[in-house]
Image (cartoon, rainbow, N blue to C red):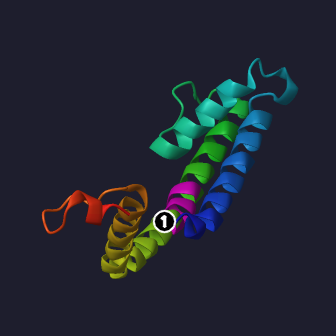
């Protein structure tokens, strides 16, 4: 299941990094005090699909930031998250189809491990000496 998620996670990570870089540039680029603040702001904006609380339309920089937020949230929620949800749904259906086989495989593995680790099989069908492996 993890191998099927890697392409979707890679696309999501690239989009997140691109939007983080765009927010970094809109917030002033090298003048930004902490890059982690930009990362947290981008994460909160993209995941919650809400505008940052400090946006007011008074200056042109805030208008650019507002437009970037609207475009980023729209693109991220409509395209990226839907692709991710679609991949998760597809992987769930595949795993559901092979769940009985997986269950039996794990059960057989557990029995095999038990037989390998036990020195005496606990049963009343034979004596301890006969049951010793």
Q: Pick out the residue farthest to the front.
A: 129
Q: Which residue is depicted at the point 51% across and 56% down?
A: 77
| Nearer-the-camera pick, 79 or 3 | 3
| Nearer-the-camera pick, 56 or 28 | 28
Q: Is residue 108 magenta?
A: no
| Nearer-the-camera pick, 105 or 87 | 105
Q: Secondary structure at mark 1?
A: helix
Where's residue 123, x and y in %? 17, 62
Question: Which span of residues is magenta-colored?
Answer: 76-83
Where's residue 87, x and y in %? 50, 70
For label 1, the residue is: 82
Question: Compared with residue 22, is residue 94 higher up or lower down, i.e. above or below?
Answer: below
Query: Is residue 49 among the parts visible in the rendering?
Result: no
Q: Is residue 107 left or right of residue 72?
A: left
| Nearer-the-camera pick, 106 or 40 | 106
Q: Which residue is depicted at the point 57% across and 61% down?
A: 80
């Amino acid at each position: 299941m993890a191998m099927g998620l890697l392409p979707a996670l890679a696309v999501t990570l690239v989009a997140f990094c691109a939007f983080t870089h765009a927010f970094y540039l809109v917030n002033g680029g090298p003048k930004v005090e902490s890059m982690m603040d930009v990362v947290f702001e981008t994460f909160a904006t993209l995941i919650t699909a809400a505008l940052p609380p400090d946006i007011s339309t008074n200056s042109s920089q805030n208008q650019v930031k507002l437009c970037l937020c609207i475009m980023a949230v729209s693109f991220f929620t409509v395209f990226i998250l839907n692709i991710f949800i679609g991949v998760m749904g597809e992987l769930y259906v595949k795993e559901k189809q092979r769940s009985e086989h997986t269950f039996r495989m794990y059960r057989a593995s557990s029995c095999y491990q038990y037989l390998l680790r036990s020195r005496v099989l606990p049963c009343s069908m034979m004596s301890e000496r006969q049951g010793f492996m």
